[in-house]
Amino acid sequence: MVGAVIIVIVLLVVIPVLVLASSPLIAAAFGQTLTVDGEVRNEGSELIELNK
C-alpha cells in the first residue's frame, strides 16, 4: 500500500514539476542556438543590424 502511494505521489507531483522546470531551459537553449545560427547564416546582412 505504501508503494502505491509513493508511485501516485511521484506521478502527480514529481514528474510534472520536473517537466515544468526543464521546459524553460530547453526553450532557452533552443532559442540561443537558433539565434546564433541565424546570425551566422545571414552575416553581412543589414537586417541583422536593424534587429539589435
Image (cartoon, rainbow, N blue to C red):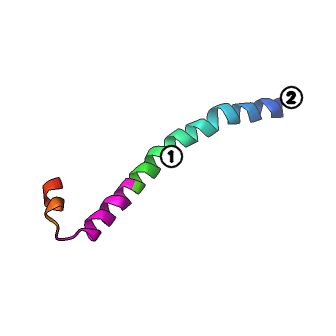
Circle 2 sits on which residue? 1
Image coordinates of residue 44 in percent, x first then y, are: 16, 71
Residue range corresponding to the magenta coloring: 31-44
Q: Which quadrant: the C terminus? A: bottom left
- The reply to whether the magenta stretch includes residue 40 is yes
Q: Quick one: SS at disc 2?
A: loop
x 39%, y 51%: residue? 28
Image coordinates of residue 31 in percent, x first then y, are: 37, 54
Going by the numbered disc 1, the residue's amino acid type is Ser
x 24%, y 68%: residue? 42
Q: Nearer the viewer, residue 9 or 43?
A: 43
Q: Is 50 on the left-hand or right-hand side of 36? A: left
User: Which of the 4 image quadrants contains residue 16?
Assistant: top right
User: Of marks 1 and 2, which one's residue comes earlier in the chain?
Assistant: 2
Label at residue 22: 1
Q: Is residue 50 visible?
A: yes
x 41%, y 56%: residue? 29
Disc 2: CA contacts within 10 A as few (<14), some (14-19) or many (>=20): few
